[in-house]
């Protein structure tokens, strides 16, 4: 189901009539249903009652693959549910005559009995004009079960049905229900139902845009689950099945699995340009990362992908997707071949116009060393706009490593307090060269020498990060930041997440103390004591601070329509679900503690992303996030890991320029000229 939340309410009801030729023709262009004045659902099928098909044929066509009704089945399902005594002789006989009549047309008065046969409810719709979607269907009853609904439209008499339709959501829900009711004996039927589900989810996934990453992820996860369930029933997969399954693996960041399956199985039976394209994408994503500049210049990491591109274009020289992959790889090779030059001479701090009502928010997740990706994206923005981040954004929010970036871009220069001390390029270098200065292991003694993997004692000394923060931020106070600032931390005495802001009552707090607090990740660093209270990493409760920043902007008096948000993730990893356990014990929880902690901590950032996408439209809310094939721990600062993160960040940027170019350009134009 593709759902849109639009607050433009439908208006001006348009009547339908079987004699109104213009209205009937316009029915072809209506493909959405508006529920409760704001929820927009896609129609899967719309059928006109043209008089050539009977009521049963129309229902069978509408619910293709779900039901297969005939008059005998109708009788078996309906007659036991009705009573001559309760209904009266005349109505009972009328229904019996209808059940016996071959070729009967769809009539309103028989719909309650058809709903018994197909286990779905019928709801009447009108057609209305909508601000965002032109003409749409609007159910008369707005408070109904959308999961099991069939919609119908009548002529002006209200008795003659002129069209019926079903939404994607209702259709898929009905298939799931049928699967739940299927027995283990109906293997072929279950396989066919899974085929229908896979086909529907793939259509929905391909209709989504590049930036709709959470929706895309959910669709491909459904597809993956359906394929796994199907493969438990049969190993008979067609080349098309294998192609779709490999695409599913790639979309879920299982690049190595996809490459192996394509190379060892799919290419033996299906050497099309589509197959080669998927192999190119998998090879680009799961390449080896070199440790030295010399190895990078040899472009060895892309040789396999380049060879596959050549083979794909021999199959079809006009394949746009393959050409896009070639463009991305060429740009990445160009980046790897040249030394990065400092853009400081090109970037300028520009003072904000005093009467400007627009308010731009930058929000950055926590994630340790993975914060380098957010810093790289911001460096690209600074290069494209020729502006510093502190002149593009009026508020910066960050948790843990995100707070380091936000503070680093907002801290004033030591000698000129009206301009920023650092730009994004300098922060990229911080991550590349100073990671080892943050994660300094505590000196060995008897206790931490025997520190087990289950220990909660901190792994690292806090002295290293304090020295780093003092070097970059000196004695600067939170209140001296050039932009509004929002940094979440958890205080031992509070029942809520505390937000350090530039307007905080503790305005005299130093940035060093704030950063020491928000980076005090449990098991990594000890809590930071400030004003006699323990403070720990805000990521425990608010790893994604976007909603907190947005709420603060509203609190400061800015209008919703004037607020823009750029939210930067620091990468995530899609784990396979844990094996079900009816009686989990302490060993189960200890063995799977990383997975369980990930669920607890990561759910907040995804929930915030979803909530922000509902609160704000696509032009006012941007979320950039990547998905890893393997988990990258926040304290892995080794050169090969940093190289990998750097490359992933640049890959994502190049993918945005190819697949989401218009949206990226609109963002750059907004930040450049606002």
Image (cartoon, grey):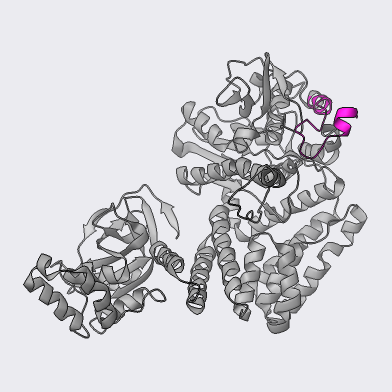
Viewer-closest of 151 and 70: 70
210, above or below 113, in the image: above
Q: Residue at x 50, y 64 (%)?
A: 204
- In the rendered structure, the answer to whether residue 527 lies left or right of residue 341 reads left
Is residue 569 in sight in this rendering? no
Seen as rendered, the residue at the extreme right is 294
Magenta stretch encompasses residue 616: no
The stretch of residues the image draws in magenta is: 442-469
Q: Residue at x 62, y 15 (%)?
A: 506
Magenta stretch encompasses residue 460: yes
Residue 448 position by quadrant: top right
- In the rendered structure, the answer to whether residue 359 lies left or right of residue 351 reads left
505, above or below 26, in the image: above
Residue 22 position by quadrant: bottom left
Q: Residue at x 38, y 63 (%)?
A: 170
**Residue 214 place in picture, x, y as percent:** 56, 53
Viewer-closest of 640 and 294: 640
Viewer-closest of 453 and 467: 453
**Residue 476 place in picture, x, y as percent:** 72, 19
- In the rendered structure, the answer to whether residue 508 lies left or right of residue 359 reads right
Is residue 361 in sight in this rendering? yes
**Residue 434 place in picture, x, y as percent:** 84, 36
The N terminus lies in which quarter of the figure? bottom left
> What predominant SS class does the magenta segment belong to?
loop
**Residue 261 place in picture, x, y as percent:** 72, 72
């Amino acid at each position: 189901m593709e759902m849109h939340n639009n607050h433009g309410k439908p208006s001006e009801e348009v009547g339908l009539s079987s004699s109104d030729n213009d209205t009937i023709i316009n029915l072809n262009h209506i493909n959405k249903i508006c529920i409760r004045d704001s929820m927009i659902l896609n129609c899967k099928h719309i059928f006109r009652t043209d008089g050539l098909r009977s009521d049963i044929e129309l229902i069978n066509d509408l619910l293709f693959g779900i039901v297969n009704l005939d008059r005998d089945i109708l009788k078996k399902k309906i007659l036991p549910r009705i009573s001559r005594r309760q209904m009266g002789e005349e109505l009972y006989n009328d229904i019996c005559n209808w059940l016996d009549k071959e070729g009967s047309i769809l009539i309103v008065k028989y719909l309650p009995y058809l709903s018994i046969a197909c286990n779905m409810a019928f709801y009447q719709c009108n057609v209305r004009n909508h601000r965002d979607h032109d003409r749409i269907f609007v159910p008369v009853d707005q408070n109904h079960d959308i999961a099991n609904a069939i919609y119908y439209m009548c002529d002006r008499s209200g008795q003659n049905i002129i069209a019926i339709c079903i939404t994607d959501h209702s259709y898929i829900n009905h298939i799931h229900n049928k699967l739940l009711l299927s027995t283990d004996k109906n293997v072929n039927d279950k396989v066919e139902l899974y085929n229908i589900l896979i086909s529907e989810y793939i259509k929905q996934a391909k209709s989504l845009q590049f930036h709709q990453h959470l929706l895309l992820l959910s669709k491909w996860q459904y597809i993956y689950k359906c394929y796994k369930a199907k493969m438990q029933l049969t190993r008979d997969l067609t080349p098309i099945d294998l192609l779709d399954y490999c695409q599913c693996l790639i979309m879920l960041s299982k690049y190595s699995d996809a490459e192996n399956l394509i190379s060892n199985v799919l290419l033996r039976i299906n050497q099309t340009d589509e197959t080669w394209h998927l192999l190119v994408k998998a090879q680009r994503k799961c390449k080896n990362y070199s440790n030295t500049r010399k190895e990078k210049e040899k472009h060895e990491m892309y040789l396999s992908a380049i060879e596959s591109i050549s083979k794909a274009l021999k199959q079809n020289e006009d394949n746009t997707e393959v050409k896009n992959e070639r463009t991305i790889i060429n740009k990445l090779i160009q980046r790897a071949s040249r030394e990065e030059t400092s853009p400081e001479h090109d970037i300028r701090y520009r003072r904000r116009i005093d009467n400007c009502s627009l308010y731009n928010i930058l929000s950055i997740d926590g994630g340790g060393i993975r914060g380098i990706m957010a810093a790289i994206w911001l460096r690209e923005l600074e290069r494209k706009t020729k502006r510093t981040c502190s002149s593009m954004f009026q508020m910066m929010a960050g948790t843990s490593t995100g707070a380091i970036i936000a503070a680093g871009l907002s801290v004033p220069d030591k000698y000129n307090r009206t301009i920023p001390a650092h730009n994004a390029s300098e922060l990229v270098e911080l991550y590349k060269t100073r990671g080892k200065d943050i994660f300094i292991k505590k000196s060995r003694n008897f206790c931490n020498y025997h520190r087990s993997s289950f220990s909660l004692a901190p792994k690292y000394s806090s002295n290293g990060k304090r020295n780093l923060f003092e070097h970059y931020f000196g004695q600067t106070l939170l209140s001296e930041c050039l932009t509004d600032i929002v940094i979440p931390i958890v205080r031992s005495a509070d029942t809520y997440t505390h937000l350090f802001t530039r307007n905080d009552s503790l305005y005299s707090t130093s940035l060093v103390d704030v950063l020491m607090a928000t980076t005090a990740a449990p098991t990594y660093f000890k809590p930071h004591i400030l004003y006699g209270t323990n403070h720990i990493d805000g990521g425990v409760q608010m790893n994604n601070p976007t909603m907190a920043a947005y709420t603060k902007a509203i609190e400061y008096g800015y209008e919703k329509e004037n607020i823009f948000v750029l939210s930067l993730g620091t990468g995530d990893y899609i784990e396979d679900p844990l094996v079900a356990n009816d009686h989990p014990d302490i060993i189960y929880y200890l063995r799977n503690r990383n997975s369980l902690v990930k669920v607890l901590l990561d759910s907040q950032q995804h929930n915030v992303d979803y909530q922000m996408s509902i609160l704000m439209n696509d032009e006012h809310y941007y979320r950039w996030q990547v998905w890893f094939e393997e988990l990258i721990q926040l304290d892995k600062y080794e050169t090969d890991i940093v190289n990998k993160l750097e490359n992933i960040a640049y890959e994502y940027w190049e993918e945005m320029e190819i697949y989401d170019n218009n949206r990226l350009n609109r963002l750059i134009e907004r930040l450049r000229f606002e």
